[in-house]
Amino acid sequence: MAARRVNPRAVKLHRSYSVPELAACFGVHKNTVRHWQRDGLKPLDGGRPVLFQGATVRAFLSTRNASRKRPCSPGTLYCFRCREPRPPALGMVDFVSFNDKSGNIRAICATCETVMHRRVSKTELASILPGCDVQYVEALRRLKGSSPPSLNCDLERQAAA
């Protein structure tokens, strides 16, 4: 299962936390907090129970979350299968418009051939994907405009008989 990012702001800066308190604060298992300690989270001292300062926990989790981010450079979209920003295959991108100002970019990953998506405004389209061939696709029709459903007439015949 993929790692879940915890919110570092859930701890108070000037408070000391034990392992079970940190686990309850973030909604994770106690072993997760112990893994954080093994990965570099420093306790207050070497005594028992093991206590952590809130400011230290917040700084550790903030740097850990920041190191996991993969910002997309111009000309790339994030591929969930590769877990990396990748360029679209053959430089071809579809833009599905939702309204006058924004829409979704849809492209195929050049490495693993997975469909990649990104929400973007029309004004930022040229700066996000320079040098890519953008095709404008009409959005799918909504259910609101569909024809009324067919009625089951068999029930009326059974009631009349």
Image (cartoon, rainbow, N blue to C red):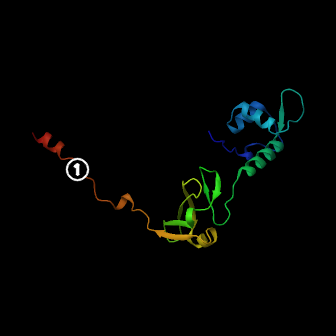
Q: State the residue at coordinates (74%, 51%).
A: 66
**Residue 8 x/y as whole percent:** 74, 46
Please tell me which residue is depicted at 80% across the width and 44% down the height of the picture. 60
Name the secondary structure under disc 1. Answer: loop
Residue shown at 75%/50% (left/top)? Answer: 67
Instruction: Residue 33: name its quadrant.
Output: top right
Q: Determine the residue located farthest toward the left in the rendered image.
A: 161
The correct choice, above or below, for 158 with respect to 136 in the image is above
Q: Quadrant of residue 71?
A: bottom right
Left or right of 5 on screen, residue 39: right
Residue topped by disc 1: 151
The residue at the point 50 percent across, 71 percent down is 100
* Rendered location of residue 105, percent (x, y): 54, 63
x and y percentages locating residue 28 in the rendered image: 68, 35
Quarter-of-image position of residue 37: top right
Nearest to the observer: residue 76 or residue 65: 76
Residue closest to the eye, 48 or 83: 83
**Mark 1: few/some/many CA within 10 Å (<14, 14-19, 20+):** few
60 with respect to 109 (left or right): right
What amino acid is labelled 1 in the image? Leu
Assign the C terminus to one quadrant of the image. Answer: top left
Q: Quadrant of the N terminus?
A: top right
Tell me where residue 36 appears, x and y as whole percent.
77, 37
Image mark count = 1
In the image, 144 versus 42, the foreground residue is 42
